[in-house]
Image (cartoon, rainbow, N blue to C red):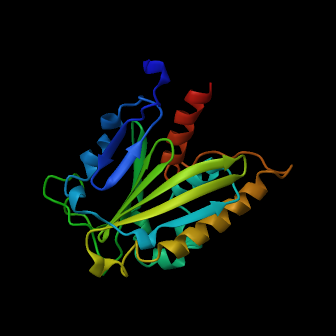
Amino acid sequence: RPSDDLASVPIRSWGPVYFASLSSQPPFRDWIRPLHAWLGFLDASKLVPDPDAERRYVVNANWKLYLDNYLEGFHIPTVHKGLLSSLDVGGYRAECFEGGSLQIGMAAHGTPTLELDSSHPLFGQSVAAMYFHLFPNTLVNVYPWGVSINRVNPMGLARTEVIFARYVLNSDLLESGAGSDLHTVEMEDEAVVEATQRGIRSRLYTRGRYAPQHEAAVHHFHRWWSARIG
């Protein structure tokens, strides 16, 4: 009988990247739509997986703290000195949409930029990187050399697994620009996130206000999450 069959899980793809979900909501086409809307200039079918670059990180912090850190660029000047040299942080901004958000990193002078076509909303601007958060836990980072994807998996109240994968379009640009040293950036982020995890356990900790200019994407994620946990 059908009830004896193994469960069937739908699988969909974006270029060489495959996705599976135990839930049919939201439909994959709706979940992935922001990438199509913003990345029409990028032919995903030409992305080449780089299995040697795959990494697994374990962070001693709650998964939402990891995402909070990802979703704001305010910490870049103090935490990421190397990345800072590739970005014009004065032009850093976020766009929120149903199902996620996009952070736009503008390029410092002399930094490689994305090749945007004339129909793109950012055409004519020097964009070093685009950072997508697709709710709840998928991060898609677009650089001149290609795309990196982070899967952020909760492992406990204060433990998170992050799986990093890389897909290359132009290997000549791997060592330059905002996406040139992602391991160092990851280590810097993990140190800050783990320190925050320790800090919020203090009896002296109280929640602060959201910074409208820098934490729009953080606030957007928090509202989405709160609506789902009642």
Left or right, 82 with respect to 66, comes to left
Residue located at (34% from left, 54% from top) = 17
Residue at (36%, 75%) from the top-left corner? 108
Q: How many marks?
A: 0
Which residue appears at 62% of the width and 24% of the height?
A: 230
The answer to whether residue 71 shows anywhere in this view is no
Q: Nearer the viewer, residue 117 or 59?
A: 59
Q: Is residue 98 visible?
A: yes
Query: Looking at the image, which residue is at 51% across and 47% down?
Result: 137
Residue 193 on image: x %, y %: 66, 60
- How far across and down, in percent of the image, does residue 1 sit? 44, 17
Q: Nearer the viewer, residue 221 or 124?
A: 221
Compared with residue 162, is residue 8 higher up or lower down, i.e. above or below? Answer: above
Image location (x, y in percent) of residue 228 = 56, 28
The location of residue 71, given as percent across then percent down, is 51, 53
Which residue in the rendered view is the most extreme toward the front?
Answer: 1
Q: Residue furthest left?
A: 118
